[in-house]
Amino acid sequence: MKKYLLFFSFLILAVYSCKDDDGVDSGALAVSFAVPSANLTEDVTDVVISFSKATTAAGTITLGVTETEAEYGIDYTTNPTGSASTLTVPFEAGVSKVIFKFNKLVPAVEGEVKNVKYTINAISTNYEITGNNTTVLNFNETALTGRSLAPQVGGPSQANQVYIDLSSGAMTTVPRVSWDLGFYSGNEFRVILNNSVKMSVKSLNSTNLAAVVAEDNTMLISQGSGNLNQVDNPTGVITETAIAEVSANDAENSVYLINLGSNPGSTPPDLGKPSADSGSHRGWKKVRILRNGNGYKFQYADLNATTFNEVLIDKNAAFNFNFFSFTANATVNVEPQKEKWDINFTTFVNTVNMGGGQLIPYFYPDFIVNNSRGGALAYSVSTADFSYDAFTMANVDQSKFINDQRGIGSLWRGTSAPGPNGDPVSQFVLKTDIFFVLKDPAGNIYKIKMTGGALPNLERGHPTFVYSLL
Amino acid sequence: MRIKSLIFSLCCVNGFVMNAQVDSLDQSIEDTRLEELVITGQFEPQSIKKSVHNVRVISDADIKNLAANNLTDVLNQYLNISVSSNEQSGKSSASLFGLDSQYFKVLIDNIPVVSDTGLGTNVDLTQINLDNVERIEIIEGSMGVTHGANAVSGILNIITKKSSKYDWELSASVQEETLGKEFSFFDKGRHIQSFKASHNLSENWYASIGVNRNDKRGFFDDRKGIDYPINNGERGFTQLPKEQLTTNTTIGYQKGETRIFYKFDYLNETITFYNPIVVPIVNYPFPETYFSRDKRFLTNRYFQHLNYYGKLFNDLVFNVSLSHQKQQRDEELFDYHYADKKERENNRNVYHSKDVLYSTGTLTNITKSKKVDLQLGYELVSENSFANASTGVFLDKENQANGIRKRLENYDVYAIAELNFTDRFSLRPGIRYSFQSKFDNQYSYSIGSRYLFDKGIEARLSAGYSYRTPNFDELYTYMVDSNHNIQGNQDLIPEKSNYIEANIKKNTFFKSGLTMYNSISSGLMFVDDRISTVLISQEPILSYKYINVDTYKMWNIAAENRIGYKNWNFAAGLSLIGISQQLTNNVSGSTSDDRFLYTLNINTALSYQLPEYQTQFTVYFKHNGKTQEFVDVSSPGESNFVLSELEAYNWLDASVRRTFFNGKFETMIGARNLLNVVTLQRSTTSSIGGGAHSASGTTLLGVGRSYFVKLTYNLNF
């Protein structure tokens, strides 16, 4: 029996020795600039050099310097002090990053290319030089060459839309429920629905907005239900909205019944599940939209009302749309200017084929829309064809930039994984065999790699990505 | 048509054999009784010939020749049983007459053995180790009177060794086995080590212990194993790595008419699932690192059994067993980080657990008459069961995970009479009444008869009624939300089953030394109030509920033949099983076709002994015919039942065994699945259960042709 006791103790030891609660591992010992480029908007800029693991001993990093239209001591200085060709940055033991200060003395003139480029040449300890081994500090505002971003879409309920401008790294976060309709600022007279909340719309074939109207539950969008012609075309092509083009002839502008869709869930769902559309129903409105010169005259009311409100909404060429909120009873700011955003993290009503060849509306959390109306177009690349790291400008296929806002869409993730007995289980799955190429409104071309969508504990709604200018 | 001609030829073969025997009568010496003793379902151990039940025996020799470490390895070759394995977890279960392991009871020394979700039922055959086994007895058909609930399609009773003719018996063995083409001493293949010791402590006391470690590494097939951080679905294993440690301890006491034994068995099993999904961790500006959400299932089983057999007042024979058993399967979730190959965030939860207090006892020789004997028996069962919410679909009204814990009890009494009208003719009526805590009280009954003709011919006719109690999934499943509506049903009643079987067999012994055994049997079974998930409404969403609705009819005919001559032994069996099931779609009111769908199984075994070299050659072959069933693939507005067909396959095992130094050293080499059957095609896919659940078109049957070597050292003195 003793022998068994010994055996069992070994067994128990073996099982428990597997347990390990130290932090997440971060790979090999390495050093890198935190970002590959930055714009010197302030007089003093902190330049960050990161270590993959905290340093075990003090040491120094030797940087090489390449100046473009800038001269040390005249246009800029650094702290610690360096020279026109080199800069040595000391670091302590036990730190995960080290900072040197860059003092901009003489700003650039408009249109001038003026920058200082640092290269990590050596480190006194056994750290590997990887990642961003150079960083370029631009005296002028210049398109960024890449970084890592984590849009705050708001966890499993994904209550926010986050608009990203890759060239500046700017993120604009707005609640999904902050707007209902978008009035197009381009040549056409078109109105879009907020399709991040499962809205749908139906023409009542009447011009009398004062008439009392009943709710129509067949318009609700849920799994397997919903009507294709009651939602905007998911491609984002402006001529294919569910609401017909606003006619110059008022008599042709019908009253529409609008289902305002669902709120984001208010209670936390089971870990791993989204709750983007599990909130209460947002109600109903009836609307009628007329032209007002080169703008819109927007009339709206509750379904049982016999009177209605009216607001005038102009076009503003700097933006794709002017947005209106029934909650605010006013126009609201949502999208950045149309050339100041490239992609939008949002939820989305796509159309899918659920068998039988019939397309039906289907709600997607974790969706990414590219700003096709503003001129940002995207397509996907399989890692079987190119690796992300090796992908260069020469590999870009211009013919794949098509006018569809779903260039990234839901292609970056799946929602089921094979379980232990072979049956699929519901789980957020980041696809690591795909990355994306995006052309921004200014013509810059970026490669984008999604690096996450859920927390380690599986909570959804935490996307992260890296990108790099080609 | 093919089936008809097969039945025809089957009957002809038997007719031919019978005739041949008649012709050879002159030469035959008088029948010798086969004094093979059986226990299962008997008052007292008695010869298989006298048994009223038709008992089939898998002998120690069969277990040895198949190098069987667990029940799966032997049942693969059993005629009416088909073994199905979960391709991923490697769990395997038996189905008999097309009914799954919920209808079939596995016992060890007459005590039903605990499993994750059953007592005797739902047994994972790979968890039943055969190290200390004397033989296996199988009785097909309704055994509700002697063995209680869920003994519907049959029972399998494992008889363990409880004595030794030697003072000391020591044995150690090592078995190395490939998994298909995969083998290496540490990372691939199957590695078994075992040790046994038994000792007669005194004239009255006997003790034995045994340890067995069965380390089955993951079967890679086209997968890439553990350290493969690429998200293309290739990480992990086609069949999960499984490691089992079993121990068994027996202490026996025997003095005069009193026999007592105590057994303690322990099983520890670890199965590890390596998730094909690789998750990156952002570490900008450094490259991402990766981890996967893996899990392991850890099972512990304790089995204790105390048995007391003796006599009261000189004549009354009692046999009482007390047993405590517990099986707990835990699920341990963890994150496996590739960079440093470490596990983090380990989190262990109970997945399934079952704690059983069990007692059964009988009193026989009440009448003191040879002609009429009566057995009175009882069975007390108290099961405390737990199922984690993730084992099934167990949610509460707020859609939160809701584990199920229930105590189910039943207290049964039964009486069986054995009426021996003559030496030839016996009749055996019996009845059981069961007081149930959860369900209405149940009963079963049976009647069996046996007639011994001259010339070694035996005839048996039996009939019985028994029941199967609903399981947790059927009772407590609950998932109702905006997209789903699947509900268990606490008002379910046990399924009812009637079975009738007729059997004729003949043992013949020729002067030449030729021995022959021929048996033909036919059975008929009806299962009513069969529980099924039924679509009860389509609007607003598809709603499913478990209901007692379906019917199941089975008839079979089986022939078993064995011939022994000098050093040759040959066995051949053939079985045809016809199953008729009517599936009901409650919404449309339509039902599926209920015609009989037939499966043909054939098994043969051939062995040859070479005494001068102490060598034995054995070949086992089984043909598993194609199986068909109707499945409900109804979609909204249209009910549709389609025929799903799993293709036929053949299974061939072979081995050579040689002993050296008077049996002290034993070597064996062999092969399993020589015909290298890996996948089977299923002709249709089904979509049942409220959405996108589709069965794959191919079923992985096994790991393909694999080879084994076994070395054993025996020391008896």
Image: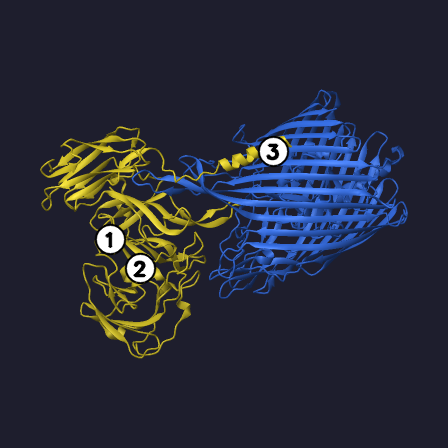
Chain colours: A yellow, B blue
Residue in the picture at 33% in, 41% down: B283
Q: Position of residue B3 (x, y in %)?
A: 69, 47
Between marks 1 and 2 in the image, the one whose residue lies nearer the viewer: 2
Chain bearing tag 2 is A
Helix, strand or loop at label 3? It is helix
Instruction: Place residue A32 in its image quadrant.
Output: top left
Q: Position of residue A344 (x, y in %)?
A: 29, 54
Quadrant (top left, top right, bottom left, bottom right) of the N terminus of chain A: top right
Instruction: Place residue B171 in its image quadrant.
Output: top right
Q: Position of residue A139 (x, y in %)?
A: 14, 43
Q: Nearer the viewer, residue A106 or A207?
A: A106
Q: Which mark is residue A175?
A: 2
First in sequence: mark 2 vs mark 3: 3
For marks 1 and 3, give the CA distance: 67 Å
Residue A167 position (above or below residue A330): above
Q: Which mark is residue A5?
A: 3
